[in-house]
Structure formats: structure tokens, C-alpha cells
Image: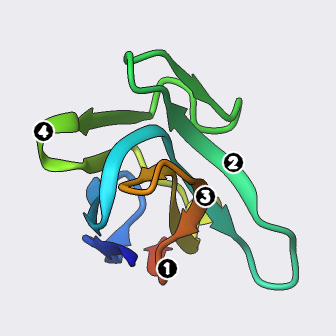
Amino acid sequence: QVQLVESGGGLVQAGGSLRLSCAASGSIFSINAMGWYRQHPGKQRELVAASTRGGSTNYADSVKGRFTISRDNAKNTVYLRMNSLEPEDTAVYYCNAVIVSLRLTVNDYWGQGTQVTVSL
């Protein structure tokens, strides 16, 4: 059994910053890609940022230069630092991880989601 637990969401004023964290636990052999997605009301979930185990990253154009993804492989944790937040960043943010279990099966896991609200 694998769990992803997110933390760090909340309410912030435009121009402010937040840091999201997502820790994976359970029957984990290794973690490949980890990333953050977000979902605006009534819209599809979209990629915000992703990181390979080796540290390669990619970002949605809308967050480039403002958001930074990082990970601590020893802690099975991924972070999303969000600076210069805009009202358009308001969404539910989901952590995602591609995890190799102790049985060497590969599966895609999601966190429960954390709300980020940016006010004017």
C-alpha cells in the first residue's frame, strides 16, 4: 500500500508565496517521476510541474519563472514552491508519483488534493 500525503495549501494574497509538500510512504522500492497537477473548477486536471528522479524538470508555461519543483529522494518527498501567486493560480493542487513497489510493480499514485486560493 502506498500513500501520498500533501500539505501546505491555503489562502494567500496575490503576489504572495506558498510551498506545497507531498510525502510518499508505504511499500516503496523507488520513485520515478513526481509532479504537481492542478484542477480549476469545471476544468480538466493539468500539469503544473514535474521532476524525474534524476532532477530533470518541466513546467507549464503559465508558471515558468514563478514556481519551482524540487524533491528529496531520501525522504520520498516532492515540493512545489509557488511565488508571485496570481488569482488564476487558485485551484486544487494534486501530487502525483510513479512508484515502483516492493513487488517491483509500477503504478501511478495521486494525493488527496490541497486547495490553494489566491485573493486580490
Foreground residue among 52 and 114: 52
Q: Any mark on residue 107, and which? A: 3
Residue on which the image places disc 4:
74
| Badge nearest the viewer, 3 or 2 | 3
* Residue type marked 2: Leu
Residue on which the image places disc 1:
113
Q: Earlier in the sequence, mark 2 or mark 1?
A: 2
In the rendered view, does 70 fall on the left or right side of 41? left
Q: Estimate how packed mark 2 is, as few (under 14), some (14 to 19) or many (20 or more) residues with alpha carbons within 10 Å.
A: some
Q: Which of marks 4 and 3 is nearer the N terminus?
A: 4
* Residue type marked 4: Ala
Measuring from the top left, give residue 52's x and y in whole percent: 48, 26
Compute the Cα span from label 2 to label 1: 14 Å
Q: At 51% from the left edge and 46% from the top edge, which residue is drawn? A: 35
**Residue 103 seen in render:** yes
Foreground residue among 18 and 30: 30
